[in-house]
Image (tube, rainbow, N blue to C red):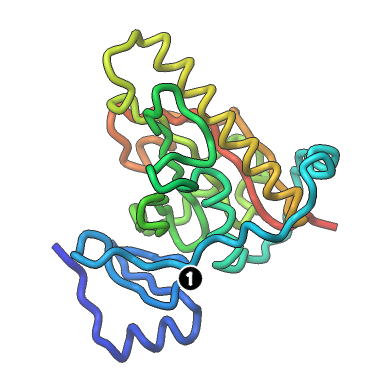
C-alpha cells in the first residue's frame, strides 16, 4: 500500500531538510527531483561527488579505526556519498564500487540512525525505511556503538548466491562485506570522519529487531560519525 502525503507537507519537508521521509515509506537522498520507488518514474538523483578527496596513498596512510564519536548527525549529502562509495553503482551495466563473486551483489546495507533503520537501494540511490526505531545500540556489544550517528549493518542475502555450498556462502558473504567496509574506511579517511568495522554483534537479537528472513545473515557492522575530541 502506498503512503500518501499532501503536496504542502512534501514541499515543506524538502525545503527544510533537503529530503523527505514517510513512516513506512521512503527517505530519498538529496535530489532536485524526488519520486517514490516503485512508481513509473525512477528517482533522479545528482551524481555522487567523485572529484574531491585525497590521493589513494594518503588515504591508506590515514585509514584507522575510531571508537569515540560526537553525536552530531551527518548531512544528507555526506550520507549520499558514503553509501555510493560503499556499494553504489559506478557503471552503466549496474556493477558496483566493490566486487562480488560472480557479480552476485549479495550484500545489503542497512543504515541505523536515530530516525530509524533504512535499507540502501543502490539502483534508485535511495534509503527505504524498514524499521521506524533507533536500533543503533543493538548493532554491537560495545557501549560506544549507540553514540555514532550512523551504524551500517552488512547483511548477506544467501538467496542471491545461487547453488553453492553453505561454507562458500559464508566465505563469500564475509569477503564481500570486508571489501565494502574498506571502501567506507577510505571514504571516511577522505572526509575526516571516524569509523570502525565490528564483528562483536548479538546477531540473533539484531536480526529479530530488523525482521530479517532466515536466509539473510548479518556479517559485520560499521560505525560512522565525527571523531570525538
Name above or below for residue 217 compared with residue 128: above
Is 142 in front, or is 55? 55
Q: Position of residue 76 (x, y in %)?
A: 55, 67
Q: Residue at x 63, y 44 (%)?
A: 184
Direction from residue 132 to residue 147 in the image, left or right: right
Give the quadrant of the N terminus.
bottom left
Front in this rendered view, residue 192 or 213: 192
Residue 13 image-quadrant placement: bottom left
Give the quarter of the figure containing the C terminus: bottom right
Tell which residue pokes out farthest to the front in this image: 92
Residue 195: x and y in percent read 69, 45
Q: In the drawing, does residue 198 fall left or right of residue 66?
A: left
**Classed neighbour count for the residue bearing mark 1: other residues with Cα under 10 Å, few (<14), some (14–19), many (≥20):** many
Name the outermost residue toward the left. 1
Question: Which quadrant of the figure has residue 220?
Answer: top right
What is the total number of numbered labels drawn onto the structure image?
1
Report if residue 138 is visible in the image: no
The structure residue drawn at horizontal position 39% and vertical position 35%, both measured from the top left corner, is 207
> Which of these two is toward me, 172 or 90?
90
Q: Horizontal placement of 96 versus 198: left or right?
A: left
Q: Which residue is mark 1?
A: 30
In terms of secondary structure, where does tag 1 sit? loop
Q: Quadrant of residue 210?
A: top left
Q: Vertically, is 136 above or below 105?
A: below
* Residue at x-position 84% and y-position 44%: 58
Please say whether residue 9 is visible from this viewpoint.
yes
* Residue that appears at 42% across and 53% down: 117
With respect to residue 144, does 203 lie above or below? above
Picture coordinates of residue 182, whole percent (x, y): 65, 36
Amino acid at each position: 500500500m502506498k503512503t500518501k502525503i499532501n503536496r504542502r507537507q512534501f514541499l515543506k519537508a524538502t525545503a527544510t531538510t533537503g529530503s523527505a521521509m514517510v513512516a513506512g515509506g521512503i527517505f530519498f537522498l538529496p535530489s532536485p527531483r524526488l519520486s517514490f520507488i516503485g512508481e513509473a518514474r525512477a528517482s533522479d538523483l545528482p551524481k555522487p561527488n567523485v572529484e574531491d578527496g585525497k590521493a589513494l596513498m594518503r588515504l591508506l596512510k590515514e585509514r584507522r579505526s575510531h571508537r569515540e564519536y560526537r553525536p552530531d548527525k551527518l548531512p544528507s549529502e555526506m550520507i549520499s556519498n558514503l553509501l555510493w562509495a560503499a556499494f553504489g553503482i559506478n557503471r552503466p551495466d549496474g556493477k558496483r564500487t566493490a566486487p562480488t563473486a560472480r557479480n552476485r551483489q549479495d550484500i545489503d546495507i542497512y543504515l541505523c540512525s536515530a530516525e530509524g533503520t533504512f535499507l540502501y537501494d543502490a539502483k534508485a540511490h535511495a534509503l527505504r525505511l524498514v524499521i521506524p526505531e533507533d536500533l543503533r545500540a543493538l548493532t554491537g556489544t560495545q557501549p560506544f556503538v549507540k553514540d555514532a550517528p550512523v551504524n551500517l549493518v552488512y547483511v548477506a542475502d544467501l538467496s542471491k548466491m545461487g547453488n553453492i555450498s553453505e561454507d562458500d556462502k559464508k566465505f563469500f558473504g564475509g569477503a564481500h562485506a570486508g571489501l565494502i567496509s574498506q571502501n567506507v574506511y577510505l571514504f571516511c579517511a577522505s572526509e575526516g570522519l571516524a569509523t570502525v568495522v565490528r564483528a562483536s554483534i548479538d546477531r540473533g537479537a539484531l536480526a529479530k529487531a530488523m525482521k530479517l528472513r532466515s536466509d539473510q545473515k548479518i556479517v559485520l557492522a560499521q560505525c560512522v560519525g565525527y571523531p570525538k575530541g
